[in-house]
Structures are given as C-alpha cells and as structure tokens.
Image (cartoon, rainbow, N blue to C red):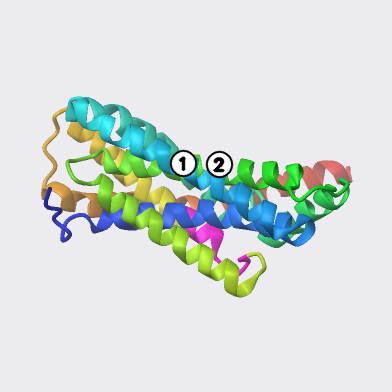
C-alpha cells in the first residue's frame, strides 16, 4: 500500500506529540526505579511492557481493516474527541492556575521515596522493580496504543504513519533518558498536552464527520481549520477560567475575613 506522505503529516504529528507526553511520564518512574532498585530489573520490566504493547498493536491494528471504514471512523472518532477534550480541559485549567502543573521532578522524588521504603530483593531479579516499571510503561503505553490505533483508523494506510510518529517519540525519549539520566522536567508538558488536546479533538471531530457522511471542505486539509477552531476556543478559555478562579478566591477571602 502506497502512503501519501504529503497528506499524512497531521497523523504523524498527533501520534508523535501525544506519545511524547505519555513516554515522558513513564520514563520518570522507570528512572526512579533504576536509580533506587537497579537498572536490570527496571529496564527488563519496561522492555517486557513494550513487547506486550507491540503485540497488541500488531493484533488489533489489522483487525480494524475488516470493519467498515465509516463505522470505525464514527466510533473511534467519538472516543478520540472525548480523549482530546479531556486533555484539553486539564491543560486549560493548568494554564489558568486552577489546578497545579504536572511536576516530573516531584513525581520522581515521590516514586524514589516509595521505592526506598521497600526492602531490596536478595536475588538477581527485583520483583518490585520489575512490577513497577512494567506497570507504568504498560499504563502509559496503552494510551499511546489507543492514540495510534485511533488516529490510524481514520483512513486506509494511516496506521503506519501513526506508528512511525509514536516510535519516533519513543526513540527520542529513550535517548534523552540515557543521556540525561534524570526526569525530563524541561519538557513543557502542559504546552504539549494543550497542543495534543487540540490535535486529538480536531481529528476526532473530523472522523465523526466522516463517519456520519459529512463532506468536509478541502477534505483532509479541513483538519487544519478544526485545529485552529479548537485552539482559538481553548486560548479564550484560559483567561476566562483564570478570571473566574480569581473571583471565587476573592469571594472566599472576603467570607473568611468576616
């Protein structure tokens, strides 16, 4: 099957950015496990989870081609839209200061403290390290698998570009982890989630429209218009949420001072 790379770049970009967010969160915990419990068990647990995830993609990705494309677009598009809106909502609230930003350094410190409180294994393998690394890689990786399959289900030949985007994200995060050996706190995680939320919401809306038989103006290029629309709404929502939060805080302070 020939892939039209000129038109699949949004698929690659969406899978790449979404995967980076999930892989960075997994890397933070794996680094904590390796630093405290040993790298052999930590890397083995993470590697085993990646192998399971690859099997899942290999099994379920091709199965989607047996389902009518319109049905896949409608169902997967709806899920992708909800998934993207969830990320976008959290990113808006964090940007507005309503909920705290995600801090990879704090997560690393918390995981390190938890792992240190558990006694070290006497044998060559550490069950705690294996299980912890496997669990976090599996949990974050399942979200990546969902995104890859969902983004790739939107049309014929899109699964390969989506997989390439996710694989590139994995390779980049692994390289940075090896080089830096510490949490990637310099990655603007909320900005990434904001961007990914916009991308996934746009893709989800596009696939739902395709699934119900809507003809989009400009075909695939209308995704850019949807991205701009979601970005504009989210950008307006940030100061509105900040203003509402400040108003609620002022009311609470006035009531507390009475």
Few, some or many residues within 10 Å of mark 2 (<14, 14–19, 20+):
many
Q: Nearer the viewer, residue 53 or 149?
A: 53
Q: Which residues are magenta?
A: 184-194
Q: Nearer the viewer, residue 4 or 105?
A: 4
Few, some or many residues within 10 Å of mark 1 (<14, 14–19, 20+):
some
- The numbered mark at residue 53 is 1
List the residue tagged with mark 2: 138
Q: Mark 1: which secondary structure?
A: helix
Q: Mark 2: which secondary structure?
A: helix
Which residue is at a point 26% across and 49% down the rendered structure image?
Answer: 160
Decide: marks 1, 2 in contact (CB < 8 A)?
A: yes
Could you say where residue 81 lies in the image, as x and y percent from the top left? 37, 37
Residue pushed farthest front?
124
On screen, residue 86 versus residue 221, left or right, reads: right
Could you say where residue 31 lies in the image, as x and y percent from the top left? 67, 60
The reply to whether the magenta stretch includes residue 149 is: no
Which residue is at a point 38% across and 32% down the rendered structure image?
Answer: 79
Q: Is residue 22 visible?
A: yes
Which residue is at a point 31% across and 46% down the rendered structure image?
Answer: 202
Q: Nearer the viewer, residue 79 or 258?
A: 79
Instruction: Classify 119 as above or below 210.
Output: below
Task: Work out how far the residue at label 1 is from the one at label 2, CA to CA, in angstroms.
Answer: 7 Å
On screen, residue 78 versus residue 133, left or right, reads: left
Could you say where residue 167 lies in the image, as x and y percent from the top left? 39, 56
Q: Is residue 29 visible?
A: no
Quadrant of the drawing holding the C terminus: top right
């Amino acid at each position: 099957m020939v892939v039209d790379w000129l038109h699949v770049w949004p698929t690659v970009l969406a899978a790449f950015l979404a995967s980076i967010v999930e892989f960075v969160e997994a890397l933070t915990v794996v680094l904590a496990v390796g630093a405290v419990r040993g790298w052999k068990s930590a890397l083995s647990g993470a590697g085993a989870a990646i192998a399971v995830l690859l099997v899942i993609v290999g099994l379920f990705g091709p199965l989607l081609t047996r389902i009518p494309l319109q049905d896949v677009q409608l169902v997967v598009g709806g899920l992708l839209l909800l998934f993207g809106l969830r990320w976008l909502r959290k990113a808006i609230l964090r940007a507005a200061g309503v909920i705290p930003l995600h801090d990879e350094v704090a997560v690393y410190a918390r995981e390190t403290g938890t792992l240190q409180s558990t006694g070290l294994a006497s044998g060559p393998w550490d069950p705690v390290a294996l299980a912890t690394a496997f669990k976090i890689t599996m949990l974050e990786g399942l979200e990546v698998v969902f995104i890859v399959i969902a983004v790739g289900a939107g049309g014929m030949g899109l699964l390969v570009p989506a997989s390439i985007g996710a694989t590139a994200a994995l390779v980049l995060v692994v390289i940075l982890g090896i080089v830096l050996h510490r949490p990637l706190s310099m990655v603007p995680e909320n900005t990434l989630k904001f961007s990914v939320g916009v991308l996934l919401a746009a893709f989800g809306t596009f696939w739902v429209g395709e699934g119900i038989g809507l003809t989009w103006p400009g075909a695939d290029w209308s995704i850019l218009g949807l991205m701009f629309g979601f970005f504009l709404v989210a950008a307006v929502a940030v100061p509105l949420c900040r203003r509402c939060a400040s108003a609620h805080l002022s009311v609470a302070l006035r009531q507390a001072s009475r």
